[in-house]
Image (cartoon, grey):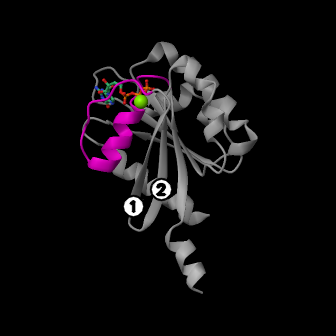
Amino acid sequence: RQMLYFSLTTLKHKVIVVGLDNAGKTTILYQFLTKEAVHTSPTIGSNVEQITVRNTHFLVWDIGGQENLRASWYSYYCNTEIVILVVDSTDRERLTLTKEELHRMLSHEDLQNAAVLILANKQDVKGSLTAAEISQILTLESITTHSWHVQACCALTGEGLPASLDWMKSRVVAN
Ligand SMILES: Nc1nc2c(ncn2[C@@H]2O[C@H](COP(=O)(O)OP(=O)(O)OP(=O)(O)O)[C@@H](O)[C@H]2O)c(=O)[nH]1
Ligand SMILES: [Mg+2]
């Protein structure tokens, strides 16, 4: 009984944060953690932090998005329950690339049971694409194999991030 109690209270849900370089992944990770915008530099490798939402513990891996690092994203997939795909909503030119990365990820066997949260980041920038426009370009409606959700946010102010954590919690509680 004591062993069971121990394992239940230390259970951590694995989350990975992916997306192209400069999307705002690291800024989001530390906004989740400290409720502040921190100064970042491009991530080489990854950062990992534990985020707790009302007794639900997430172990969140923020992975570097530069082109040469994307080839090793797969090494983080095992046991992932939630994939957060961060999109720079001002970066129209590279949305097709993001779409390819997303659909490639979803076909990987280690992510078959993962839920996907798409964060349309940088909503503070004038002229940025809306969450609905990003959904359309990424063809999210065609995804029937995974549970997914799209959320508009701004990593600098934290707007949209509490709602994201609520959705993540609802996904792991549902399982
Ligand atoms: N205006 C605006 N800038 C943002 C926002 N989020 C992040 N940024 C800026 O975007 C730049 C890149 O942010 P990072 O969090 O380092 O990006 P990243 O996705 O971790 O990039 P890599 O580690 O190279 O993959 C930084 O200058 C951030 O301050 C946002 O919501 N609005
Ligand atoms: Mg980073």
Residue 69 horizontal/vertical position (percent): 56, 23
| Closer to the eye: label 1 or 2 | 2
Q: Quadrant of residue 48?
A: top left
Name the residue nearer the viewer: 162 or 8. Answer: 8
Give the residue at the far bottom of this rendering: 1
Task: Bin the neighbour count of mark 1 within 10 Å (Cα to Cα): few under 14, some 14-19, many 20 and up.
Answer: few
Say which quadrant the N terminus sits in: bottom right
Task: Bin the neighbour count of mark 2 within 10 Å (Cα to Cα): few under 14, some 14-19, many 20 and up.
Answer: many
Rendered image: mark on residue 110: none
- Which residue is rendered at x = 73% and y = 35% of the image? 107
Residue 113 horizontal/vertical position (percent): 68, 51
- Contact between marks 1 and 2 (CB within 8 A): the answer is yes
- Which residue is rendered at x = 39% and y = 61% of the image? 53
Residue type pointed to by label 2: Phe
On whether residue 107 falls in the magenta region, the answer is no
Q: Is residue 100 above or below residue 146?
A: above
Which residue is label 2 attached to? 58
Could you tell whether 37 is left or right of 140 in the image?
left
Residue 145 in view (yes/no): no
Q: CA distance from mark 1 to mark 2?
A: 8 Å
On whether residue 34 falls in the magenta region, the answer is yes
Give the residue at the far top of this rendering: 93
Rendered image: mark on residue 53: 1
Residue 116 in view (yes/no): yes
Q: Quadrant of residue 96?
A: top right
Dot 2 lies on which element?
Answer: strand
- Which residue is rendered at x = 60% and y = 79% of the image? 4
Say which quadrant the C terminus sits in: bottom right
Residue type pointed to by label 1: Val
Magenta part of the protein: which range?
20-43
Name the residue nearer the viewer: 121 or 143. Answer: 121
